[in-house]
Image: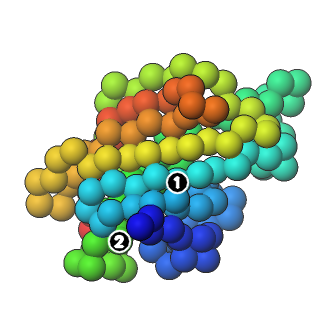
Amino acid sequence: MARTLNSNEIQKILPHRHPFLLVDRIDDYEPGISATGTKCVTVNEPFFAGHFPEEHVMPGVLIVEALAQVGAIALLSLPENQGKLAFFGGIRKCRFRKKVVPGDVLSMQCDIIEMRGSVGIGKAVAKVDGKVACQAELTFAVG
């Protein structure tokens, strides 16, 4: 059975708030193992005012941040990590393969592939309509 989180439940785990909370829903998660989430991209996103006014494209750095927030749910949903923060430790092998534009539904998954103490590595992928938009290895430091 899928474990889901709505936006109010996400905010009980993540410290992010508007306009920087970039996950609308967690579709499933297994604490310490993985999480999948969704971001419904609308033209009303504040970043579209400047990126780019003539052709709206979601900034790649925000796609990576959204992926990191999904990965943080996997890590911070562990009982021993309750109330802690997940900081970015690094980004490796990041590739952008498709533009993300208003109207897209960004489906994101982050699998935690390694843990060493409070440091974890996640393999993350964001897709639109089943096509990869971004993939990366993300390093988290829980503290």
4 left or right of 58 in image: left
Q: How many marks?
A: 2
As shown in the figure, which amino acid type bears the numbered disc 1? Gly
* Picture residue at 68% right of the left edge, 43% below the top: 105
32 or 49: which is nearer to us?
32
Q: Is residue 14 above or below residue 69?
A: below
Q: Position of residue 79 (x, y in %)?
A: 27, 79
The quadrant the N terminus occupies is bottom left
Neighbor class of circle 1 (other Cα within 10 Å; few <14, some 14-19, many 20+) is many
* Picture residue at 52% right of the left edge, 54% below the top: 37
129 or 102: which is nearer to us?
129
Q: Which secondary structure lies at badge 1?
A: strand
* Viewer can see residue 69: no
Residue at the spot of label 2: 77
Q: Are marks 1 and 2 in contact (CB under 8 Å)?
A: no
Cα distance in 3D space between marks 1 and 2: 14 Å
* Viewer can see residue 2: yes
Decide which of tag 1 and tag 2 comes sooner along the chain.
1
Q: Which secondary structure lies at badge 2?
A: loop
Residue at the spot of label 1: 37
Residue 2 figure quarter: bottom left
Neighbor class of circle 2 (other Cα within 10 Å; few <14, some 14-19, many 20+) is many
As shown in the figure, which amino acid type bears the numbered disc 2? Ser
108 left or right of 137 in image: right
* Picture residue at 32% right of the left edge, 47% below the top: 111
* Picture residue at 60% right of the left edge, 70% below the top: 6
Q: Residue furthest right?
A: 54
The quadrant the C terminus occupies is bottom left
50 or 14: which is nearer to us?
14
